[in-house]
Amino acid sequence: MSLDFGLLQTLHRMLRQLTDIEDRMRRGPMKVKIVETNETSFATDEAECLSRQDELRRSSNEKTMQLNEREAKIEDMKAKLNACESNKEFQLLKDRIAADLQANSVLQDEILEMLERLDVVNAEVVDAKANHQKSKDETAVMRDKVKLELIELTAEKERVSGELAESEKDLPGTMMDNYRRLVRLKGENSFAVFMIDNCDNCNQRLTTQTISNLMLKKLVYCPGCGAVLYTKT
Ligand SMILES: [Zn+2]
């Protein structure tokens, strides 16, 4: 009995379609995973920026408070100058005021430097927040897209599987068990095209006997990969 190579070709095409659909079904969640990883990294950046901003704000506030306290102390000392009862006492107080003024000037420079750094960090926070938000939006879009694709691919898989089951009914009953086993193990590689002298799956060179069996459209398994061989019609 001769085999319908057109049917084998159709089954092969459908099995390939199923492989392709299953690959795409697997790629969807991977694409989501990638954007989710990006989002996590942008969230970490934002948290780090916010923490640096917080730290700088806190230390510049502390230093400003320190400066205010010292300035108040200087004013206090200045008020006491007139009440000095000796020249020595007056000179001592004047020296302390001068030393504190000097210390305050250093503190003012430090505060100024901190505020400049804070300006830079504030701008970084704005960027980090924008990047994080953008990444969140991208993740949401990707999740929706993949969800929709999955619905479409599931329907497509169902359709092709239905067509495949329908076409499989035309295979000779004697090869059914072997066919089922092959498909379970090898999927789309259950079939192979015979090209010139070789199996298109594994490049095994076929014997003259095998080729003549193929020419007679007999059921031939590739001795190399075990696929059912056919010639294109
Ligand atoms: Zn082969």
Image (spheres, grey):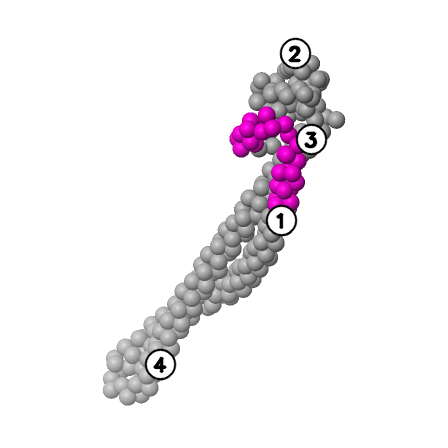
Q: Nearer the viewer, residue 142 or 193?
A: 193
Marks 1 and 4 in Cβ contact (< 8 Å) = no
Q: Nearer the viewer, residue 59 or 158?
A: 158
Q: Which residue is mark 1?
A: 155
**Is 158 rendered above or below residue 108?**
above
Q: Earlier in the sequence, mark 2 or mark 3?
A: 3
Hey, which quadrant is residue 136 in on the image? bottom right
Q: Residue at x 58, y 41 (%)?
A: 22
Q: Earlier in the sequence, mark 1 or mark 4?
A: 4
Q: Nearer the viewer, residue 97 or 14?
A: 14
Q: Which mark is residue 209?
A: 2
Q: Which mark is residue 71?
A: none
Q: Secondary structure at mark 2?
A: helix
Q: Which residue is mark 3?
A: 7
**Is 154 rendered above or below residue 44?**
above
Q: Position of residue 97 (x, y in %)?
A: 33, 77
Q: Within 10 Å of the Cα at label 4, are there few (<14), some (14-19), or many (20+) other Cα atoms? A: few
Q: Which residue is mark 4?
A: 72
Q: Residue at x 48, y 58 (%)?
A: 43
Q: Secondary structure at mark 4?
A: helix
Q: What secondary structure characterizes most of the magenta part?
A: helix
- Is residue 28 at all visible to an observer of this figure? yes
Disc nearest the viewer among 1 and 3: 3
> Where are the magenta residues, as a range?
157-185
**Amino acid type, callout 3:** Leu
Which corner quadrant holds the C terminus?
Answer: top right
With 191 as the anchor, is 73 left or right in this view? left
Q: Secondary structure at mark 3?
A: helix
Q: Position of residue 9 (x, y in %)?
A: 69, 30
Q: Earlier in the sequence, mark 4 or mark 3?
A: 3
